[in-house]
């Protein structure tokens, strides 16, 4: 067994050897606790049949744990300074491919041709805080069917994604993710186990793909447009938010009124009180009543 990358001393040794300095703009925080990495791999239920996509491998701390458990690992790293570091730290593992590319520019379906056998595809990653949501939505909306995501992110963002209706954290992000996936927080990671130490604790969020979306909608794009519109001004009523987004002329008002009535939703409610089912009813009513 190779000596773990993710100990404070080995991490410092690797950083020193390669003269690496952290870039704040890339949100780099390296995990230095092998036990937590083992817990992440366990939460993702990875075995020798699993193909894994990792985003932002850093110096390879999580990557090596994934490589030990999975069939193959495909890791995307944007920072060119880390490519030679990863070539060094991951040299013992022949089932890892590091791609020097921005995950947001990647055609995931094409890149995963690397996997030499079919099997579940899971995303396991310590996501950079500043770009967590765009990365997740890029993966969920891609042509690639990802069975599961087990990702580390700011605790507050994890709370927003897994939030239930009627709570402060619930919003369009909760709906966008829960439409595709079932979301649960696996465990909390204290800020003290990172170099450099971030300002807040992290959470490991587990997202498992639903067999079919959570609700049936006639137009997905319009459903997401509606959910975003409903939260633009959180303290405003649903009616005021919809008027701001869909127009205030008589025709728009009539259309909104009849659709709300058909969906049996009180326009005086706030967006945060509506369930996914209620948003779907309203979205379908708006579609059906379009002139």
Image (cartoon, rainbow, N blue to C red):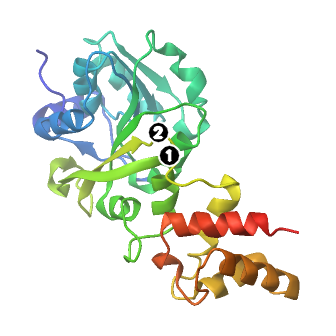
Which residue corresponds to mark 2?
Answer: 211
- 188 to the left or right of 49: left
- 11 to the left or right of 181: left
Q: Secondary structure at mark 1?
A: helix
* 10 Å crowding of disc 2: few (<14), some (14-19), many (20+): few
Which residue corresponds to mark 1?
Answer: 135
* 10 Å crowding of disc 1: few (<14), some (14-19), many (20+): some
Taking 226 as reference, is 247 above or below it? below
Q: Secondary structure at mark 2?
A: loop
Q: Quadrant of residue 229?
A: bottom right
Q: Quadrant of residue 49?
A: top left
Which percent across, then down, holds residue 18?
30, 28
- 45 to the left or right of 250: left
Can residue 53 be seen here? The reply is no
Which percent across, then down, holds residue 63?
29, 27
Which percent across, then down, holds residue 190?
17, 56
Gap in angstroms between the C-alphas marked 2 and 1: 22 Å
- What residue is at 48 percent from the left and 35 percent from the top? 78
Sequence-wise first label, 2 or 1:
1
Residue in front for this viewpoint, 239 or 257: 257
Residue in front for this viewpoint, 43 or 114: 43
Disc 2 or disc 1, which is closer to the eye? 2
- 250 to the left or right of 182: right
Can residue 58 be seen here? The reply is yes
- What residue is at 25 percent from the left and 21 percent from the top? 47
- What residue is at 44 percent from the left and 56 percent from the top? 130
- What residue is at 47 percent from the left and 53 percent from the top? 177
Residue in front for this viewpoint, 48 or 194: 48
Q: Which quarter of the figure is the N terminus placed in?
A: top left
């Amino acid at each position: 067994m190779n000596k773990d990358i993710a100990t404070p001393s080995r991490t410092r040794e690797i950083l020193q050897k390669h003269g690496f300095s952290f870039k704040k703009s890339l949100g780099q925080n390296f995990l230095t606790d092998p036990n937590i990495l083992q817990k992440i791999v366990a939460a993702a239920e990875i075995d020798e049949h699993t193909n894994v996509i990792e985003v932002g491998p850093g110096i390879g701390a999580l990557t090596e744990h994934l490589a030990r458990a999975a069939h193959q690992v495909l890791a995307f790293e944007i920072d060119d300074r880390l490519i030679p570091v990863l070539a060094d730290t991951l040299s013992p593992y022949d089932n890892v491919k590091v791609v020097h590319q921005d995950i947001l520019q990647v055609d995931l379906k094409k890149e995963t041709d690397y996997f030499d056998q079919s099997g579940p595809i899971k995303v396991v990653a310590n996501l950079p805080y500043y770009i967590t949501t765009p990365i997740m939505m890029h993966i969920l909306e891609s042509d690639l069917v990802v069975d599961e995501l087990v990702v580390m992110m700011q605790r507050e963002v994890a709370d927003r994604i897994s939030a239930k209706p009627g709570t402060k954290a619930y919003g369009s992000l909760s709906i966008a993710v829960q439409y595709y996936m079932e979301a649960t927080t696996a465990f909390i990671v204290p800020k003290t186990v990172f170099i450099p130490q971030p300002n807040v604790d992290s959470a490991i969020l587990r997202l498992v793909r639903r067999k079919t979306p959570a609700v049936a909608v006639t137009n997905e794009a319009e459903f997401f447009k509606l959910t975003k519109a409903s939260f633009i001004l959180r303290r405003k009523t649903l009616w005021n938010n919809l008027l701001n987004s869909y127009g205030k002329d008589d025709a728009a008002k009539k259309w909104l009124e009849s659709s709300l009535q058909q969906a049996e939703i009180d326009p005086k409610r706030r967006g945060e009180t509506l369930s996914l089912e209620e948003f779907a009813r309203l979205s379908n009513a708006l579609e059906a009543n379009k002139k």
